[in-house]
Image: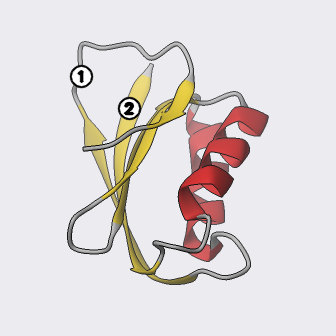
Amino acid sequence: MKTYHLRITGKVQGVWYRASAKDKALALGLKGKVWNEPDGAVGALVQGDDDLITAFIEWCKEGPMLAEVNEVVVDEQAVDEIYSSFEIVRK
């Protein structure tokens, strides 16, 4: 199973981005977590099938209605942890 780290920048905090990302990930059957970064970005780790992750990344480029996404940087990660759900976490 592949794992990707996403860093989403723009107006993405205070606009329900994390909650909407969780809803989208769960709807796609993906696992992982999403969090706010101190610099105003949103970070996420997502695990699942490549085609479903691609759909999630495409959603992240738009985000919820109030968001204004500038950039989504995606990096494949080598992790030992296998997530059992998709959660909003604090970092």
Q: Position of residue 50 (x, y in %)?
A: 56, 36
Residue at the disc numbered 1: 79
The answer to which image quadrant residue 33 occupies is top left
Q: Is residue 31 left or right of residue 52?
A: left
Q: What element carries label 1?
A: loop
Q: Which residue is drawn at 71% across and 44% down?
A: 23
Badge 2 density bin: few <14, some 14–19, many ≥20, Cα 10 Å: many
Q: Are marks 2 and 1 in contact (CB under 8 Å)?
A: yes
The answer to which image quadrant residue 53 occupies is top right
Amino acid type at circle 1 is: Val
- Quadrant where the N terminus sits is top left
Q: Which residue is drawn at 30% across and 42% down?
A: 76
Q: Which residue is drawn at 52% across and 13% down?
A: 84
Q: In this view, does 32 lie to the left or right of 26?
A: left
Q: Vertically, is 18 above or below 2?
A: below
Check residue 3 in the rendering and tell me which mark sits there, or answer none: 2
Q: What element carries label 2?
A: strand
Q: Vertically, is 12 above or below 16?
A: below
Colour scheme in the image?
Answer: secondary structure
